[in-house]
Image (cartoon, helix red, strand yellow):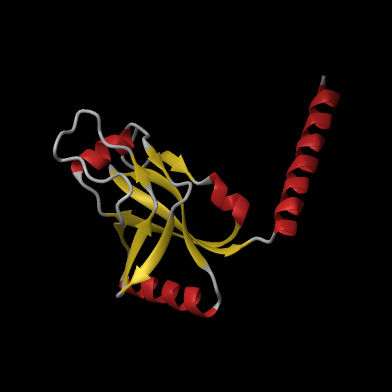
Amino acid sequence: MGKDEFKTVAQNKKAFHDYFVIESYEAGIELFGTEVKSIRQGKINLKDAWCGIDNGEIFVHGMHISPYEHGNIFNKDPIRVRKLLMHKNEINRLFGQTKQQGYTLIPLSAYFKKGKVKIQVGLCKGKKSYDKRESIAQKTAQRDVQRALKERQY
């Protein structure tokens, strides 16, 4: 793996089902050594995670990083609140959009970039149940078209 490559460790597939992703941002994350080792093993879950802005800082809540099995007293709480690292003007812009337009900040994926753990944070708008049904119908139709094309090729 080269220095410029991405290695995705986790994706939040539930976020794409429950929300429309308007924009996405890259953020660093404040972690301890045993948490990074656990993430390298792929033991991270973003399923119920969400982000909140407090006093000009952005935090991720509900993200589960399993304790590193070779760690000892240095292991941290698996679902503790973790600080995300972004530029102040980006945080202020996101804060304004979440307050005025009713958007939500959801972590979409976790990956390594140049050896550092990064989180892709999405500015999302919630889907209604009919939107979810519509997107499922579109995926099913697309799958059927692909299947029909594949059968015609053989």
Please, is residue 70 above or below residue 24 in the view?
Answer: above
- How many numbered badges does the structure rendering display? 0
Q: In the image, what residue occupies the spot 44% across and 72% down? A: 94
Q: In the image, what residue occupies the spot 19% across and 42% down? A: 33
What quarter of the picture does the C terminus occupy? top right
Task: Residue at the far left: name it.
Answer: 73
Horizontal side of residue 60 vs 67, given as left or right: right
Q: In the image, what residue occupies the spot 39% across and 44% down? A: 111
Horizontal side of residue 79 vs 94, given as left or right: left
Dividing the picture into quadrants, the one containing residue 59 is bottom left
Q: In the image, what residue occupies the spot 60% across and 54% down? A: 18
Q: Which x, y percent locates residue 122?
A: 49, 59
Horizontal side of residue 113 vs 22, given as left or right: left
Please, is residue 115 above or below residue 27 in the view?
Answer: above
Of 148 and 104, which appears nearest the observer? Answer: 104
Q: Which x, y percent locates residue 69?
A: 24, 29
Q: Is residue 6 visible?
A: no
Dividing the picture into quadrants, the one containing residue 41 is top left
Of 88 and 133, which appears nearest the observer? Answer: 133
Q: Which x, y percent locates residue 109?
A: 45, 48
Q: Which x, y percent locates residue 120?
A: 43, 54
Q: Is residue 122 visible?
A: yes
Please, is residue 94 above or below residue 32 in the view?
Answer: below
What quarter of the picture does the N terminus occupy? top left
Horizontal side of residue 146 vs 85, given as left or right: right
